[in-house]
Each structure stands twice: as structure tokens, then as C-alpha cells.
Image: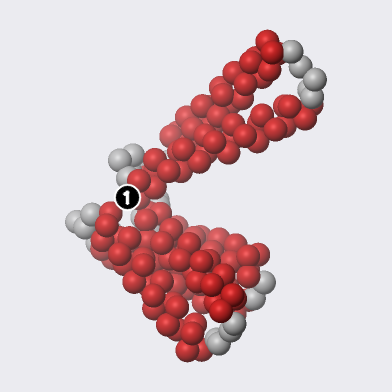
């Protein structure tokens, strides 16, 4: 079974192929190519490591857990502080403690909903869902349907490459 570096290298290799394909078929100004390259890298790289989100020792699991904590904490604090703009120090500490508990609860929920390793996430269905997510997100970021379809296909190929390397296609 390959390690996480192999998955990342395959994702970056697919990203290079995406860039070559786009440069040959879709000539644009350098600034637009830079945005396309960034979005393409995001979805190729993420697709190549995302199937391991259900493995508790993987870097993607640890990063997602951290981002869930930070995002939930910031959003809950912003929401609560908008409701109570003028508070004392004791009230602010109380609100921070509540937001901290909410963020911890969100991480615990993440632990609860992630399936066992190589179950539902290591499947073609999950790869297809990822491709639809990549299509919609890249369309929002680039406002070009053709580019979004190409990026979604390469994102799916990156996800699929992970399954191939693990020899766990379902």
C-alpha cells in the first residue's frame, strides 16, 4: 500500500497534466492562467488525499479537524458577539468558553460521522460526489463552465488515482 506522499505526488502530477492541457487548449492571459492553476491545484491535490479523511493518522484528517474547530469557534463567537456587543470581562470569558465548547462539540461530531477507514469514502460514489463539489466550487470561483468541467474531471481522476493506488475501488 502506498504512503501519503505517493497520493500527493499523483495529485500534483495530474495537476501538471491539467496545466499542460489547459495551456494547449485554452490560451488565456497570465493572470487568468494563475487563477485557473490555483483552483486546479486545489482540487487535484485535495482529491488525491481526501479519501484518507477517514484515517485518524492521516494529515487530511488532522487538518480538517483543526479547520472545523477554528471555523466553528470563529463563526460562533462572531454570531454571539454580534448579539451582545457590550459585555463585561466576565461575560466575554463566559461567551468564549461557550464558543470553545461548541467548537469541541463540532470536532466530536466530526469524529462520530466519519465512517471506518476504507468504507464509504473509498468508493466511486464518493469520488463522484467530490467531482460534483469540484464542479460547483470551481464554477463559483472561475465563472466558466467549460473550465469547471475540466477541473472537476481532473479532480475526479485525482480521487480515483488514490483508490487505484490503494487497490480499493468499490
- Residue at image coords 55%, 61%: 133
| Image location of residue 44, percent across then percent down | 43, 65
Residue 140: give x, y in percent of width and height.
Answer: 65, 64
Is residue 92 or residue 97 the one in the foreground? 92
Where residue 160 appears, as percent x and y from the top left, is 36, 66
The image quadrant that residue 30 belongs to is bottom right
* Numbered disc 1: secondary structure: loop
- Work out whether residue 71 can be spotted: yes
Q: As rendered, which of 64 and 121 lies closer to the eye?
A: 64
Q: Is residue 49 left or right of residue 35?
A: left
Instruction: From this view, report whether residue 33 is shown above or below residue 68.
Output: below
Residue depicted at x 64% and y 15%: 93
The answer to whether residue 166 is visible is no
For this orientation, the residue located farthest to the top is 90
Where does the C terminus fall, quadrant-wise?
A: bottom left
Left or right, 95 with respect to 41, comes to right
Q: Nearer the viewer, residue 168 or 13?
A: 13
User: Residue at left 50%, top 71%?
Assistant: 37
Above or below, 73 relative to 141: above
Which residue corresponds to the image point at 34% horizontal and 71% vertical from the top-left?
13
Name the image colouring: secondary structure
Amino acid at each position: 500500500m502506498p504512503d501519503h506522499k505517493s497520493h500527493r505526488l499523483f495529485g500534483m502530477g495530474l495537476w501538471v497534466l491539467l496545466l499542460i492541457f489547459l495551456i494547449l487548449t485554452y490560451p488565456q492571459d497570465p493572470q487568468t492562467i494563475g487563477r485557473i492553476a490555483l483552483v486546479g491545484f486545489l482540487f487535484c491535490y485535495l482529491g488525491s488525499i481526501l479519501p484518507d479523511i477517514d484515517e485518524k493518522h492521516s494529515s487530511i484528517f488532522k487538518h480538517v479537524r483543526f479547520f472545523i474547530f477554528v471555523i466553528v469557534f470563529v463563526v460562533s463567537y462572531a454570531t454571539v458577539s454580534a448579539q451582545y456587543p457590550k459585555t463585561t470581562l466576565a461575560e466575554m470569558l463566559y461567551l468564549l468558553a461557550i464558543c470553545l465548547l461548541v467548537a469541541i462539540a463540532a470536532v466530536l461530531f466530526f469524529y462520530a460521522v466519519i465512517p471506518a477507514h476504507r468504507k464509504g469514502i473509498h468508493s466511486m460514489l464518493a469520488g463522484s460526489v467530490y467531482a460534483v463539489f469540484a464542479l460547483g466550487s470551481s464554477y463559483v470561483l472561475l465563472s466558466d463552465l467549460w473550465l469547471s468541467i475540466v477541473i472537476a474531471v481532473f479532480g475526479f481522476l485525482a480521487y480515483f488515482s488514490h483508490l487505484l493506488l490503494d487497490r480499493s475501488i468499490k
